[in-house]
């Protein structure tokens, strides 16, 4: 009889995972719902990505690879959405929330030490991962910010009409892309410790 490559996580680690996952799930649920309303600030993105990343790491520690993969795919979606500065549509928000529900169900199953429920959660997680991966790679946006929607509308206007419109003195039409938004830099102070 062979022994497993890694011994199963002990009860105290599983309990820590459950607690960590519950806290992260609360952060993720609150933050993801806010994504539908508007493009969030940098702090919101950081909290969301940190929560997904924490679940991923905790799941790896207690050897829940399917939950870790689900959290990783969720984190990738958040990174992609932040990088594109998009407002997510209802279908995308629903997928993200279903993923968080899957993490929450896994945490409950682990807390109850219910292996059958954990296997079901693993199957559900595996089903969501390809959808999340597709969303992270999808360049189409269901609800673009105004500057992107204006740019796509411009592509439908004949070039002659643009030339006529831009030659008018009162026109504020610009073919230049909008200036990129750069998040504010954080100031870091380094103080030397006095040795003595």
Image: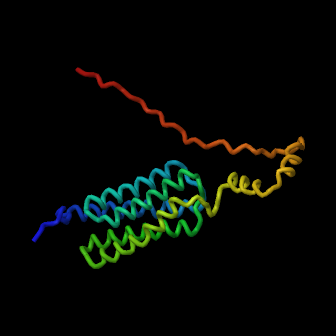
Residue 129 relative to residue 152: left or right: left
In the rendered structure, the answer to whether residue 122 lies left or right of residue 28 reads: left
Q: What residue is at 30 percent from the left and 25 percent from the top?
A: 193
**Between 134 and 53, the one nearer to me in the picture:** 134
Identify the residue at horizontal 38%, vertical 28% (top origin). Answer: 190
Is 191 placed above or below 54 here?
A: above
Q: How is the image coloured?
A: rainbow
Residue projecting furthest to the bottom: 116
User: Measuring 54% from the left and 39% from the top, which residue is drawn there?
Assistant: 184
Q: Is residue 45 left or right of residue 5?
A: right
Q: In which quarter of the image is the N terminus?
A: bottom left
Percent coordinates x, y for residue 49 in the rendering: 44, 54
* Vertical comparison of 167 with 121: above or below: above
Residue, far left? 1
Q: Is the residue 26 above or below the residue 85 in the image?
A: below
**Residue 90 image point, x, y percent:** 58, 68
- Could you say which is closer to the camera, residue 92 or residue 139? 139
Task: Tally the marks.
Answer: 0
12 vs 193, left or right, is left
Q: Which image quadrant: the C terminus?
A: top left
Question: Where is residue 101 shown, x and y percent of the image?
Answer: 42, 70
Q: Is residue 3 or residue 26 the one in the foreground? A: 3
Residue at 48 percent across and 68 percent down: it is 131
Question: Which quadrant of the view contains residue 86?
Answer: bottom right
Can you give x and y, in whole percent of width and height, for residue 63 in the image?
A: 26, 63
Give 145 or 184, whichever is nearer the viewer: 145
């Amino acid at each position: 009889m062979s022994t497993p490559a890694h011994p199963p996580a002990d009860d105290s680690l599983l309990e820590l995972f459950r607690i960590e996952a519950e806290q992260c799930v609360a952060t993720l649920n609150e933050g993801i719902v806010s994504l539908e309303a508007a493009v969030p600030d940098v702090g919101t993105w950081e909290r969301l990505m940190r929560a997904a990343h924490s679940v991923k790491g905790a799941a790896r520690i207690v050897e829940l690879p399917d939950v870790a993969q689900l959290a990783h795919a969720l984190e990738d979606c958040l990174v992609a959405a932040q990088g594109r500065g998009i407002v997510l549509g209802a279908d995308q928000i629903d997928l993200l929330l279903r993923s968080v529900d899957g993490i929450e169900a896994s945490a409950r199953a682990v807390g109850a030490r219910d292996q059958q429920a954990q296997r079901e959660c693993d199957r559900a997680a595996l089903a969501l991962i390809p959808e999340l991966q597709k969303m992270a790679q999808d360049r189409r946006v269901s609800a673009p910010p105004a500057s992107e929607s204006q740019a796509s509308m411009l592509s439908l206007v004949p070039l002659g009409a643009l030339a006529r419109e831009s030659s008018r003195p009162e026109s504020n039409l610009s073919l230049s892309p909008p200036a990129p938004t750069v998040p504010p830099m954080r100031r870091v102070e380094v103080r030397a410790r006095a040795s003595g």
